[in-house]
């Protein structure tokens, strides 16, 4: 996990990562497929999906584009 996060922030990252994983699987993409399509670093998608990494806005833009969803859709998950 990232340092200095509250439990609430950690849980948010985990739920966000689970949602990214669901979106990716709905598109029948592997992590490698998403890495390639989004043009992000090789281990980034796995780390995001496990809640180990907080993404910046440019990375989110690339991931949303690769998944063919809007950035708000990346955050459309329930607590």
Image (cartoon, grey):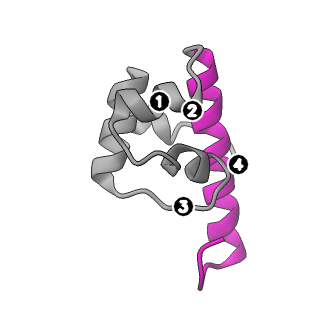
- The residues bearing labels 4 and 2 have C-alpha atoms spaced at a distance of 24 Å
First along the sequence among labels 3 and 4: 3
Badge 3: residue crowd in 10 Å (few <14, some 14–19, many ≥20): some
Pointer 3 and pointer 4: residues touching (CB < 8 Å)?
A: no
Q: Provide residue 7's location: percent of width, then percent of height.
A: 72, 74
Q: Residue at x 67, y 49 (%)?
A: 15
Which marked residue is nearer to the observer: mark 4 or mark 1?
1
First along the sequence among labels 3 and 2: 2
Q: Which residue is mark 3?
A: 53
Q: Residue at x 57, y 32 (%)?
A: 31
Q: Residue at x 40, y 48 (%)?
A: 41
Q: Vertically, is 37 above or below 75? A: above
SS for callout 2: helix
Which marked residue is nearer to the observer: mark 3 or mark 2?
2
Pointer 2 and pointer 1: residues touching (CB < 8 Å)?
A: yes
Give left or right: position of 26 versus 68.
Answer: right
Q: Residue at x 47, y 45 (%)?
A: 42
Give the dominant element type of the magenta stretch: helix, strand or loop. Answer: helix
- The residues bearing labels 2 and 1 have C-alpha atoms spaced at a distance of 5 Å
Q: Which residue is mark 1?
A: 34
First along the sequence among labels 4 and 2: 2
SS for callout 1: helix
First along the sequence among labels 1 and 3: 1
* Furthest residue toward left: 58
Badge 4: residue crowd in 10 Å (few <14, some 14–19, many ≥20): few
Q: Which residue is mark 2?
A: 31
Q: Which residue is mark 4?
A: 79
Range of magenta residues: 1-26
First along the sequence among labels 4 and 1: 1
- The residues bearing labels 3 and 2 have C-alpha atoms spaced at a distance of 15 Å
């Amino acid at each position: 996990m990232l340092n200095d996060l509250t439990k609430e922030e950690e849980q948010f990252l985990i739920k966000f990562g689970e949602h990214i994983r669901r979106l990716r699987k709905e598109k029948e993409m592997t992590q490698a497929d998403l890495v390639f399509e989004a043009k992000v670093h090789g281990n980034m998608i796995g780390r995001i999906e496990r809640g180990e990494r907080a993404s910046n806005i440019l990375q989110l833009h690339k991931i949303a584009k690769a998944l063919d969803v809007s950035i708000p859709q990346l955050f459309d998950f329930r607590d």
